[in-house]
Image: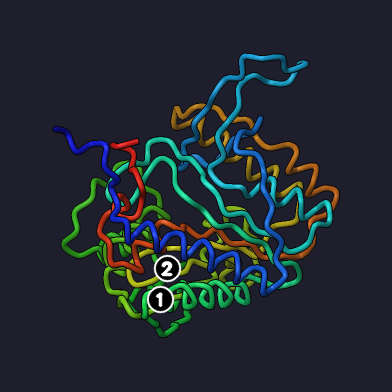
Amino acid sequence: MSEHWQPSATLDALRLRASVNRRIREFMAERGVLEVETPVMSMAGNTDPNIASFATHFSGRTDGAPRERWLRTSPEFPLKRLLAAGIGDCYELGRVFRDGEAGGRHNPEFTMLEWYRVGIDHIVLAREVADLVESCLALVGRSARIEETTYGALYHAHLGVDAHRDPIDALRHALGEVRIDPEGLTRDDWLDLLMTHRIQPAFRDDTITIVHDYPASQCALARVRDGDPPVAERFELYLGPLEVANGYHELTDACEQRARFDRDIARRATWGAPNVPRDDALLNALANGLPDSAGVALGVDRLLMAMRGAARIADVLAFDFGRA
């Protein structure tokens, strides 16, 4: 008899997931952060050319609205609309969807925790994320020390390269014995490869690593701070070698955000990727006024993997993609 019907995770792993979800809600309630729910289907998609969205079609009456809807890759855009409407500190814990991502560490649907805090920057929020991760680790009798560094200092300490200024050849050389087809790779691609192949594997299991102030070219939806060099006010947080969170000091300039969306769409066209409608509702919200805030997305499945020392995301999901 086939065992395909059985869960991909152990029952203990599923009980831990429930405990982590409960602890997340307690953590947010203790800090006065409001839980909200936003749409899973949207008229707009994620224009980021590195992220593929699922699309679906509504067959009923739309009164002129588009029938094509996009499954969210994160709740970021509607949460920011709520911020602009004055809701204050808020969070959502729920499922998100990304096409083309299935494997040892990826599942096409997964659980994301995203929250926003008004009046703070990315550095303060990163430390709050570390507090949450420490609180979750306590559920399994673990603790971790916290190391905080800038992106530039991290690359210099591990590889002796200047991540903000060195040419591509220097970055390629720093990969050492790792062999990668260089065709079409940008400077940021080489930096990402150095992170995943050379730097992340060296992170200790008992350490929470906060990396902040990224190259301006990797700003995504973060503010860029002037300087020499200018840096994106963005952070990533790692538990051991696994990245579990990515956050920003949020961009509030609607014109700049529109320009970034348009650059993404142009890049998609160049790559032959599907066209995705930009989120004009978000742009209107930014034009109305987004409060100074920082936001972060945390992958709950990744956090559970790191907590349990699991090698596969299937080990923390009731039913992974192959059993769904």
Between disc 2 and disc 1, the foreground one is 1
Instruction: Give the SS element for disc 1.
Output: helix
Instruction: Give the SS element for disc 2.
Output: loop
Which of 294/300 is in front?
300
**Would you name the residue on which mark 2 appears?**
163
Specify which label sits upstream in the sequence, 2 or 1. 1
Q: Identify which amino acid the numbered label 2 is placed on.
A: Ala
Residue 97 position in % (x across, y down): 48, 40
Decide if residue 27 is in sight here: yes
Decide if residue 232 is in sight here: no
CB contact under 8 Å: marks 2 and 1: yes
Q: Identify which amino acid the numbered label 1 is placed on.
A: Leu
Q: Which residue sits at x=63%, y=62%?
A: 295
Residue 245 position in % (x across, y down): 49, 63
In the rendered view of the protein, which quadrant contains the C terminus?
top left
In the displayed image of the protein, which residue is found farthest to the bottom?
A: 145
